[in-house]
Image (spheres, rainbow, N blue to C red):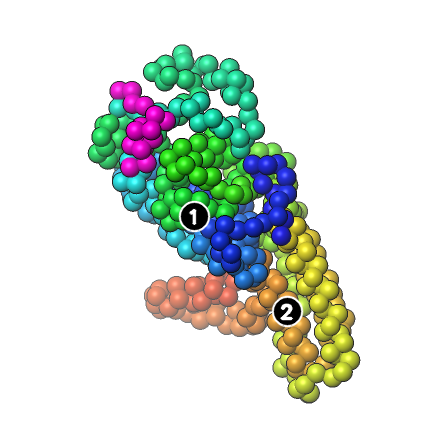
Amino acid sequence: MKVYNTLSKKKEEFVPLEEGKVKMYVCGPTVYNYIHIGNARPMIVFDTVRRYLEYKGFDVNFVSNFTDVDDKIIKKAQEEGTSAEEVSKRFIAECKKDMAGMNVKPATKHPLATEEIDGMIEMIQKLIDDGYAYVKNGTVYFRARRFKEYGKLSHKNLDDLQSGGRALLVTGEDEKEDSLDFVLWKPKKEGEPAWESPWCEGRPGWHIECSVMSKKYLGDQIDIHAGGEDLVFPHHENEIAQSEAANGKEFSKYWMHNAFLNIDNHKMSKSLGNFRTVREISEQYDLQVLRFFMLSAHYRSPLNFSAELMEASKNGLERIVTAVGNLKHLLGTAQTETLREEEKELLEKTKAYVAGFEAAMEDDFNTADAIASIFELVKFANTTANAESSKEYLQSLQELIVKLSDVLGLIVDKEEEILAEDIEALIAERQAARKEKNFRRADEIRSELLEKGIILEDTREGVKWRRA
C-alpha cells in the first residue's frame, strides 16, 4: 500500500509502527458554527482511509479532536451573550449530526481541548525546562530555531520565513526573541475563559492542543497525522516542533493532506457569498451525494463544488443504488437456490473488479478509480443477472457491491422507496390532524416522511413534497 507523505513529498510504502495496528490522528473542526463543506472534505476523505485500513484487517485507533476554545468561539459567545462552553457544546452536537448524515464513523476518541488543559501545561513546562520555550509577561513562546528541523514538513526556508515575519515585530509582538517563535500559552483577556497555570491565568495556543491530545490517546509516536493542506503551515509544522522537542521521538511517520475545495471555481468565503454549510446542502441533497462527490476526485486534487457536479454525483450514486435494488427485486422472485456451473464462472470474473478496486485504494487511496471499479461491477451485474439467476448468484453480486461501497462509506442498500400514493395518503392524514389541532400527530407524520427521504413544503397552494 502506497501513501503520499507530505514530509518526503513522495509516495511511500505504508508500514505501521506496530504490525496489524494503525494509530491515526486527524485535526477536527473549531466548533463555533455549522460545519462547512470545506470541513467535510477531510472528514470524508480520512474516514474512507480508516475504512479501507479496517477492510484490510488493521485495528485502527482513530482520534479526531474538537477545538472548543478559540477566538472565533469566544466572539460568537459574546455576540450571543452566552458562554463559549454553551456555543461549543451546541455546535459539537450539530457537527455530529452532519457527520452521521455523511456516514462518517465516530472516532475511537473525540477529545475536547478544554478537557486536556493539565496535559498542555505539563508539556509546556517540559519545553521550558529543556530550553525550547520561554516566558515573557505571562505569554509562553516556543523557540522555533532551537528545533533544528523546523520547516521540514512545509519545506520552507527559515530565512524566507524570517523576512516574511518581520512585520510582526512592529505589531506589538516585539517581545518575542524571534519572529518565528509561536505561542504555547497566552494571558486571558476580559470575559474570556481561562485556566490557572504557573505563568498566568490564561489559555493554550492552538498548536499545543493537538500535540497533547495525540500524545495522550495515541502515544509519543503515531502512524498517520492528517488534515487539510491549509494546516501544513504553521499548524502541523509547529506540532512537529513541539512534540518532537518534548518527546524526543519522530512524531508521525506519514503526513496526509487533502487539497482545497472551491465553489464554482472560486475560493469559498463569506464575503463572496459562496459559503455553503453541510446543513444547507442536506436541504437539497441526501448527504450521501455529497460524500460521493467528495470521493469522485483524488483527495490531493483540488475539487470544485457546483450544482452540475452534484447532480452528476447524484446520478452516479443512483446507478449503484438502482443496481442493488434490482438485485433485491430479482432475489424476491428467484426460482432456484444454488449456483449453476456457469454462474460460478461468472462470479470468478468479479474477482477482477475487486482487484481493480483494491489496486486503486492501495495507490494512495485513489477513490475516483475505486468508484470506477464499482461501476464496472454494477454493469456486470446488470448484464448477467436476470429472472433465471439463482438466489446464491444474486446474493453474491448484491453483497459484493454493498461491501465495496461500504468501504467508501456509501450506503447503497436502501429500504424500499415509499410510493407516491402512500405519500399523498400520509399528507392527507396530516392535513386532517392539523384541522383537528392534533399538531403532535401532524409533526410525527412530517418526521416519518423525512426519515423516508420525503421533504414537505407548506405553501399557499397547499402541501408540496419532493424526494431529498
In percent of the image, x 50 and y 47: which residue is there? 223
User: As rendered, which of 379 and 110 lies closer to the eye?
Assistant: 110
Instruction: Name the quadrant containing residue 145.
Output: top left
Give the position of the C terminus as an image quadrant: bottom right
Position in image of residue 185 (x %, y %): 31, 29
Where is 142 relative to 386, above or below? Answer: above
Where is 75 relative to 448, above or below? Answer: above
Q: How many marks?
A: 2
Regarding residue 436, the answer to whether it shows in the image is yes
* Residue under numbered circle 1: 64
Position in image of residue 227 (x %, y %): 50, 42
Identify the magenta region. 122-137
CA gap, disc 2 and disc 1: 30 Å
Q: Amino acid at mark 2?
A: Leu
Instruction: Name the quadrant containing residue 332.
Output: bottom right
Position in image of residue 284 (x %, y %): 55, 52
Regarding residue 192, the answer to whether it shows in the image is no
Element class at badge 2:
helix
Q: Is residue 242 left or right of residue 305?
A: left
Q: Amino acid at mark 1?
A: Ser
Position in image of residue 157 (x %, y %): 55, 22
Where is 79 relative to 16, above or below? Answer: above
* Residue under numbered circle 2: 400
In percent of the image, x 38 and y 44: which residue is there? 215
User: As rendered, which of 290 and 211 lies closer to the eye?
Assistant: 211
Element class at badge 1:
strand
Query: Disc 2 or 1, which lies upstream in sequence?
Result: 1
Magenta-colored stretch includes residue 134: yes
In percent of the image, x 44 and y 32: which residue is there? 241
